[in-house]
């Protein structure tokens, strides 16, 4: 608990140091101290995440840098200034297989999006095309396929210039420089943070969009490289920020960090200073448990095995043969276990003598402390056993002061009699 509080304080300090804004440039490593212009479902969580949506149905959300940016080149009436931005986002759905609508980076002349629609319009426009009074340049991270907007799939990136029909779109992914520029798919709503870079060359009118998992450096080859005439969307003062909308699947759209710059590359984000996403699904198992659980399991298995083995061993050690006909001799039947203990396990020390038919051991019955002699007799065949036992028992009924009394018998199969 104490460690948690301390790290929280450190995080706040870093955010404070990391967030700066001077006209054409801003850096947000988390949004705890940011003064964004928010509307709709958008909010900044106590942990510093910009939560555009919060698992509410059919809602929309906007978050803008509070002051407008001067986009037009004062020394040229035609050209817009270049800009560059990068941000880290995550789309976290409550359900594994279901997708809700995505989010978009927006450049617009106003922060008043009250007329825009939720759902597939991503809170950007009120119809398929923008109007003269409602213009917008957007880079959409779209997680639903809308045929009316000519979407290619439910996991794509598109550049929208004043229309929901993208100028160009591409399936989400990146060209991985670490493997020679090989294509790698990415799942936009995969609950993992991803970074987007958007670079606009005002003179050439070229807009590049690049996507990568966090910690992967910016790939050399952009995902999209689109010609966008600045006159389709540009006004002198424009707001930059984010737009998102929800449909019917409970989904959170988060922005973890964001930087923006005019006339130069956006300052890189320091991933170590970004807020962490809330945990989804079951709590990850602790390391201690990872070690203890197999150990405890092994111990349990060993204990059970030992118990089973010892039970089997004891059973075999004291195993007897008992048949129905012996019931009538009940009182004369002794358990092998008692005889075993009485004679100290038939130790040589207890041996009284070796007769014609077997060895005789001295012993003391544990229950009655009665001194006894036990003779171990081998009887090969099953035949005659009954008669033999009957004989033994009948001898047992004889009493004479010159005779040792015969108390009873026990039967056992095989073994070392
Ligand atoms: C989502 O945000 C809106 C606006 O801030 C709020 O009214 C609503 O209660 C929130 N819903 C949840 C589920 O947090
Ligand atoms: C936050 O931004 C608003 C404009 O959206 C401005 O009026 C206000 O002074 C700003 N507050 C701070 C603390 O910068
Ligand atoms: C503004 O436009 C002039 C002339 O087209 C160009 O030389 C200059 O580089 C532009 N400045 C920016 C910041 O784009
Ligand atoms: C926002 O725009 C709508 C029309 O789209 C307008 O009715 C409303 O007054 C505007 N709100 C503000 C605060 O300007
Ligand atoms: C949207 O604008 C495009 C030209 O940019 C036009 O072809 C299309 O018909 C328009 N669609 C609607 C519904 O206005
Ligand atoms: C966009 O990408 C192309 C192709 O990689 C590159 O030549 C161009 O310089 C890039 N433009 C910007 C503004 O990054």
Image (spheres, rainbow, N blue to C red):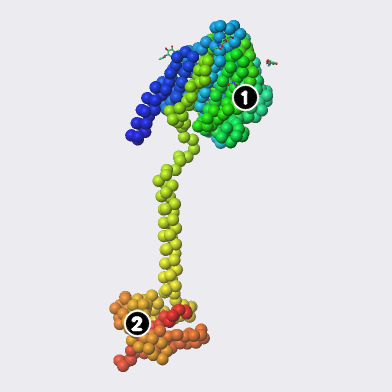
Above or below: residue 232 compared with residue 171: above
Q: Is residue 405 left or right of residue 92?
A: left
Residue corresponding to mark 2: 348
Q: Is residue 14 left or right of residue 69?
A: left
As drawn, the residue found furthest toward the bottom would be: 402
Residue corresponding to mark 1: 224
> Which image quarter is the C terminus in?
bottom left
On residue 60, the disc is none
Which residue: 47% across, 18% down? 26
Query: Pointer 1: residues within 10 angstroms few (<14), some, or many (20+)?
Result: many
Ligand 6 shows up in the quarter that is top right
Q: Is residue 259 left or right of residue 7?
A: right
Above or below: residue 104 compared with residue 234: below
In the rendered image, residue 322, in percent from the top left (x then y), is placed at 46, 77
Q: CA distance from mark 2 to mark 1?
A: 94 Å
Badge nearest the viewer, 2 or 1 = 1
> Which image quarter is the N terminus in?
top left
Locate residue 344: give its quadrant: bottom left
Front-most of residues 105 and 176: 176
Locate residue 300: give its quadrant: bottom left
Would residue 55 be visible to someone looking at this image?
A: no
Which residue: 56% across, 35% down? 178
Looking at the image, tell me whether mark 2 or mark 1 is earlier in sequence order.
1
In the rendered image, residue 233, in percent from the top left (x then y), is placed at 60, 13
Query: The residue tagged with tag 1: helix, strand or loop?
Result: strand
Query: Pointer 2: residues within 10 angstroms few (<14), some, or many (20+)?
Result: few
Which residue: 55% across, 30% down? 212
Above or below: residue 133 compared with residue 198: above
Query: The residue tagged with tag 2: helix, strand or loop?
Result: helix
In the rendered image, residue 20, in percent from the top left (x then y), is placed at 43, 18
Would residue 203 be visible to someone looking at this image?
A: yes
In the rendered image, residue 377, in percent from the top left (x then y), is placed at 42, 85
């Amino acid at each position: 608990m104490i460690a948690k509080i301390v790290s929280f304080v450190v995080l706040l300090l870093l955010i404070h140091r990391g967030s700066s804004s001077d006209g054409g440039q801003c850096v947000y490593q988390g949004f705890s101290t940011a003064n964004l212009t928010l509307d709709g479902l958008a909010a900044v969580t106590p942990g510093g995440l910009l939560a555009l949506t919060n698992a509410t149905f059919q809602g929309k959300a906007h978050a803008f840098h509070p002051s407008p940016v001067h986009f037009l080149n004062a020394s040229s009436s035609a050209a817009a200034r270049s800009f560059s931005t990068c941000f880290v986002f995550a789309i976290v759905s409550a359900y594994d297989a279901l997708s809700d609508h995505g989010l978009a980076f927006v450049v617009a002349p106003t922060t008043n999006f009250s007329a825009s629609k939720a759902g597939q319009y991503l809170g950007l426009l009120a119809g398929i095309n923008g109007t003269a009074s409602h213009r917008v340049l957007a880079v959409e991270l779209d997680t639903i396929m809308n045929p009316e907007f000519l979407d290619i799939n439910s996991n794509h990136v598109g550049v929208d210039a004043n229309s929901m029909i993208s100028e160009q779109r591409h399936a989400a992914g990146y060209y991985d420089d670490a493997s020679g520029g090989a294509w790698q798919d990415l799942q936009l709503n995969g609950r993992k943070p991803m970074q987007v870079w958007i670079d606009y060359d005002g003179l050439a009118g070229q807009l590049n969009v690049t996507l990568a998992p966090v910690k992967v450096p910016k790939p050399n080859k952009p995902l999209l490289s689109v010609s966008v005439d600045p006159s389709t969307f540009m006004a002198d003062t424009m707001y930059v920020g984010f737009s998102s909308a929800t449909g019917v699947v409970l989904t959170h759209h988060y922005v973890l960090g964001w930087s923006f710059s005019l006339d130069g590359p956006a300052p890189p984000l320091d991933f170590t200073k970004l807020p962490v996403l809330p945990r989804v699904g079951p709590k990850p198992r602790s390391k201690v448990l990872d070690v203890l659980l197999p150990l405890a399991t092994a111990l349990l298995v060993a204990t059970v095995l030992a118990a089973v083995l010892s039970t089997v061993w004891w059973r075999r050690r004291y195993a007897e043969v008992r048949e129905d006909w012996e019931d009538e001799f009940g009182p004369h039947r002794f358990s092998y276990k008692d005889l075993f203990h009485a004679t100290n396990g038939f130790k040589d020390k207890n041996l009284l003598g070796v007769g014609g038919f077997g060895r005789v051991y001295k012993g003391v019955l544990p229950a009655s402390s009665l001194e006894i002699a036990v003779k171990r007799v081998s009887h090969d065949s099953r035949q005659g056993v009954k008669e033999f036992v009957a004989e033994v028992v009948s001898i047992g009924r004889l009493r004479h002061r010159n005779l040792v009394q015969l108390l009873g018998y026990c039967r056992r199969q095989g073994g070392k009699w």
